[in-house]
Structure formats: structure tokens, C-alpha cells
Image (cartoon, coloured by chain):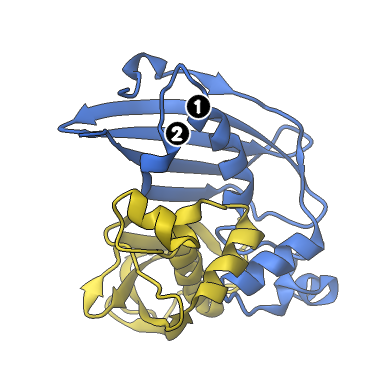
Amino acid sequence: MSAENGPTFEGLEVGQVVAAREVTFTRDTLVRYAGASGDFNPIHYNDAFAESVGLPGVIAHGMLTMGTAASVVEEWAGPGNVVDLQTRFARPIPVPAMGEATVAFTAKVGVLDTEARFARIDILVEFEGQKILAKAQAVVACA
Amino acid sequence: MPVNTEAVGRAYGPHEPYEVTRVKIREFADAVDAYSFAHRSEEAARAEGFSDAVAPTTFAVVIAQQAEFHVVVDPEVGVDFSRVVHADERFTHHRPIIAGDLISATVHIDDIKQRGGISTVTTRTELTDEDGAPVSTVISTLAVREEA
């Protein structure tokens, strides 16, 4: 895969923060993601339904959180250069009907593969001091 | 009803190919706060070396989740969708997804586990282009809480 528009491999250091962003999720954000992705599970917009299946209320799509994490990495990596992305969904993000949920994303260099010129970027996603994603890792093809 | 572990190895599709459009790429980019103009304009995408608007990293989920739905609704697999939570997800991109692509998806049930009231179903969706060349591999695990 070509990475001509990718970040320069030389000079990267393990532990270096390459990107960080705070993102605010509201019900609007969730509805917009539902429409864009086609994921219309009512736990992401209907409190009564969410409570009936044992949730505290409406929660954000895990894939909204993962997709936003990818966007944070991509802003540094350049579009098309995240060649692998994985995560476990450790905790849900409850999103209130009228308020908002502010989620902090921090992307750091985890591993550098000199031969392939790949950087593994580890993404920390926190909400109210708790880790939302576990083992969130993006492999970036560098120039 | 518990999930049927004997469904491991089943495959579904490919069904009708998914046509990737500029409008959908832009809509998805807006929804996940992907800022690059390469998601929004052919010209900006060309400047970065792509033939047309390029999809954000997790766009493949739009196509993969449609394919995974065939697993969820198969009565012989036995997933109660109202009790599902997403456990994990992985994308491996063999090449970026570009506006104009016609993508076919085949979903495979790779693993089903039952452990103390929770079943997990792991699917692998292989996305291929019009020429049959690999585009992305999407691995997804759903956790299904059994009724007490």
C-alpha cells in the first residue's frame, strides 16, 4: 500500500503523542451516526427501549467511538493510511437526552516497525476518567 | 434460546454489491468527524494520490454490518438482537475504499463461544471489488446476554 501522503517514519518515537482531541457526543451526534452508518439499533436513540434491555439509558454506538478514534489518528496519518484498526469495547458511553458527553482521545506511538515502515498507534479513549476502548490500536503506513 | 455453536463455519453472500458513492463517504466522514477534504472532493482526493473521494477508516462497517445482519437474523444461529452488545471490531484494509467502488461482501461465522450466560459470535466479512480483489477484512464479535 502506498503511503506517499503518510507521515514521515524517521523521527517518530515510541510514547510520542501524535494526535489528541476532545469530542462532544450529543443525541444529535448519535442520530447522525445512525443515519450515516445504517445502524438503527434503538439502544442508541430510545431511552425506554435501552432501559428495557438493562442499560442505564441511551448509549453511543461503539462504532461511533471507534470511528472518531480513527479520525483522530487519520488527521495525523493522512486519509487511507490507517491499514489496520482494532479495539475491544470496554465500557459504554451514556449520552443524556438533553446534555452531552465529552470524550477525550489521545493517540500515541506504541510500536515502530522499521522494516515495514509501519507505526502502531495506541489510542486512549476516556470518558469521566474511565477507559472506554481497550487495546485500541491503529497500524499506520508511513512515508 | 442459546446461540447454536454448530453454526460455526457458515457463510452468507455475496449478495447484491454495495455501490460506494461520494455522498455517502461525505456523510460518514461528517458523522465521525473525519476532517480531510479527501473525503469530500474528488480534487482534494486526487491531490493525495487517490482516483476519487476516499472513505474514512471505518467506512467499511457500513457494508460489513449489512452483511453481518444475515447472521443475526438466521433463526438457526439464534441471536436475540435485543440482547446484543458489540464486544470487539477489527478492520484490515488491503486497499482504501474509493467512491465508485462496487463492493461485494461475504460473511463467515468464525467462532461461537458460550460462557456463563454470555455467548459471543465472531464473524469475518471479506470485502472484494468488481475484479474480485480483496479490499478489506472486517472481524466483529457480538456478545449476546442470555435471558436469566
Q: Nearer the viewer, residue B120 or A81?
A: B120
Q: Position of residue A15 (x, y in %)?
A: 27, 78
Q: Local crowd at mark 2 within 10 Å, few (<14), some, or many (≥20)? A: many
Residue position marked by numbered label 2 in the rendering:
B123
Circles 1 and 2: CB atoms closer than 8 Å: yes
Question: In the rendered view, does A114 fall on the left or right side of B133?
Answer: left
Q: Position of residue B57 (x, y in %)?
A: 56, 61
What is the quadrant of the C terminus of chain A in the image? bottom right
Residue A115 appears in the figure: no
Residue A2 appears in the figure: yes
Residue furthest to the left? B116
Question: In the rendered view, does A32 fall on the left or right side of A41?
Answer: right
Which shade of the palette goes to chain B? blue
Q: Is residue A126 above or below residue B97?
A: below
Residue position marked by numbered label 1 in the rendering:
B108
Q: Position of residue A107 (x, y in %)?
A: 37, 76
Q: Position of residue A39 (x, y in %)?
A: 56, 52
Q: Nearer the viewer, residue B10 or B116?
A: B116
How many numbered marks are there? 2
Chain label for disc 1:
B
Residue at point 36% right, 64% down? A57
Which shade of the palette goes to chain A? yellow
Residue at point 32% right, 40% down? B143
What is the quadrant of the N terminus of chain A in the image? bottom right
Q: Which of B72 and B134 is in front in this view?
A: B72
Which amino acid does the dot numbered 2 rest on?
Thr
Of mark 1 and mark 2, the one earlier in the sequence is 1
